[in-house]
Image (cartoon, rainbow, N blue to C red):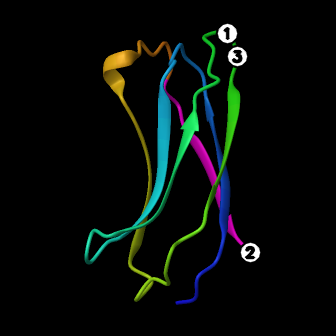
C-alpha cells in the first residue's frame, strides 16, 4: 500500500467542548498509521461539520486497517450523538 492523504469530515450536535482524535490503525498490528486532533466546535443548537486530514508516516502493509474517531466522554453531556463520517483518499 502506498502512502496517501485521507481527508474527511464528521458532523456533531451536542455541548462537547473537548477534542476528537481521528486516526487510522492497522487492524493486524494495532499500530497507529496516522492521527490528528480536531477541536470541537459543537453546539447543542445545530449540527456542526468538523474536517480533518490524515497523512500516514509510512505505508500500510496491507488493507486491513481501521478508521476511528475518539472523544473524552467525561467532559461532555450529549443531547445527541449521531455521527456521519465521510472519508476519501487522494
Determine which residue is flagged by label 3.
Answer: 46
Residue located at (62% from left, 21% from top): 42
Q: CA distance from mark 3 to mark 1?
A: 4 Å
Classify mark 3: helix, strand or loop. Answer: loop
Q: Can you name the residue that lies furthest to the left here?
A: 29
Residue neighbourhood size for the residue with mark 3, other residues' Cα within 10 Å, grouped as few (<14), some (14–19), many (≥20): few
Which disc, if any, is residue 12?
Answer: none
Q: Residue at x 46, y 56 (%)?
A: 23
Q: Is residue 84 magenta?
A: yes
Judging from the image, what secondary structure is the residue with disc 1 in? loop
Q: Position of residue 35 (x, y in %)?
A: 48, 56
Report the span colored magenta.
81-90
Q: Are marks 3 and 1 in contact (CB under 8 Å)?
A: yes
The mark closer to the camera, 3 or 2, is 2
- Report the mark closest to the observer, 1 or 2: 2
Whichever of labels 1 and 2 marks the residue nearer the N terminus, that label is 1
Give 53 or 27, whichever is nearer the viewer: 53
- Asked which quadrant contains residue 77, the reply is top left
Is 37 magenta? The answer is no
Q: Which residue is mark 2?
A: 90
Look at the picture and state if 42 lies above or below 89: above
Residue 87, image x, y percentages: 64, 59
- Give the image location of residue 62, x and y in percent: 41, 88
Tell me the CA gap for discs 3 and 2: 30 Å
11 lies above or below 45: below
Which element is circle 2 on?
loop
Residue at numbered disc 1: 45
Amino acid at each position: 500500500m502506498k502512502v496517501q492523504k485521507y481527508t474527511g469530515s464528521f458532523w456533531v450536535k451536542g455541548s462537547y467542548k473537548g477534542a476528537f482524535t481521528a486516526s487510522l490503525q492497522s487492524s493486524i498490528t494495532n499500530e497507529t498509521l496516522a492521527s490528528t486532533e480536531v477541536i470541537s466546535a459543537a453546539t447543542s443548537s445545530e449540527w456542526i461539520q468538523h474536517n480533518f486530514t490524515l497523512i500516514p508516516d509510512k505505508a500500510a502493509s496491507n488493507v486491513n486497517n481501521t478508521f476511528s474517531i475518539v472523544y473524552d466522554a467525561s467532559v461532555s453531556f450529549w443531547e445527541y450523538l449521531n455521527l456521519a463520517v465521510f472519508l476519501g483518499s487522494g
